[in-house]
Amino acid sequence: MRLLLTPALVVVVGLQASAQSYDGLCFPGNGCTGPVPITGNSFFTCEETCVMEEPTSVRGMDAFLFDVTCRGDSGTFSYRLMMARIMNEGQLRTYAITNDEITPLENCQQ
C-alpha cells in the first residue's frame, strides 16, 4: 500500500508546484508608484513587500489561488489572491482577483 501512495503524492506535489510564472506582468500603478512588477513570487509596493505562497490550482479554470503575506511600515497582513487567465475580447489576459476587486494585469515595460 505504501508504494501506491508514494507516486500519487509525488504527482500532487508536482501539480501544486507548477503554478505558472507571472514574471513580466505588473499591477497597474497608483498615486504612490508606477506599475508594480511581479518578480518570482513577490511584488513590492511603495510601503510593503508582498509574497505569494502556497499556489493551489483552481479546478476547471486556468487559475491559481495564493496566500499573500505583505510586510511593511504598517505591520504584516495577509489575504487570498487568485491569478486567472481569461479570454476577453479575443485576447488572453491575466487578472488578479481578491475579495474586493478584479484587476487586469499589464505587461511591464522592459
Image: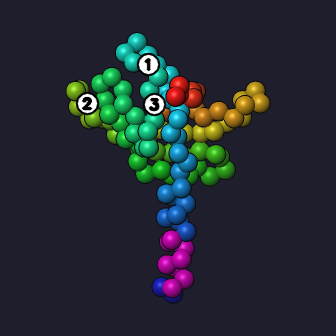
The amino acid at mark 3 is Pro
Q: Secondary structure at mark 1?
A: loop
Q: Which mark is residue 72?
A: 2
For label 1, the residue is 34
Which comes before the other along the chain, label 1 or label 2?
1
Q: Where does residue 25 sit, x and y in percent of width and height?
A: 53, 33
Q: CA distance from mark 1 to mark 2?
A: 18 Å
Helix, strand or loop at label 3? It is: strand
Report the side of 72 relative to 79 (left or right). left
Which residue was labeled with disc 3?
37
Q: Residues within 10 Å of mark 1 (few under 14, many from 20)?
A: few
| Residue at (77, 30) in percent of width and height | 90
Task: Give how far apart the Cα atoms at labels 2 and 3 are.
Answer: 17 Å
Element assignment for label 2? strand
**In the displayed image of the protein, which residue is found farthest to the right?**
90
Residue ranking furthest to the front: 110
Indicate whether residue 7 is drawn in magenta: yes
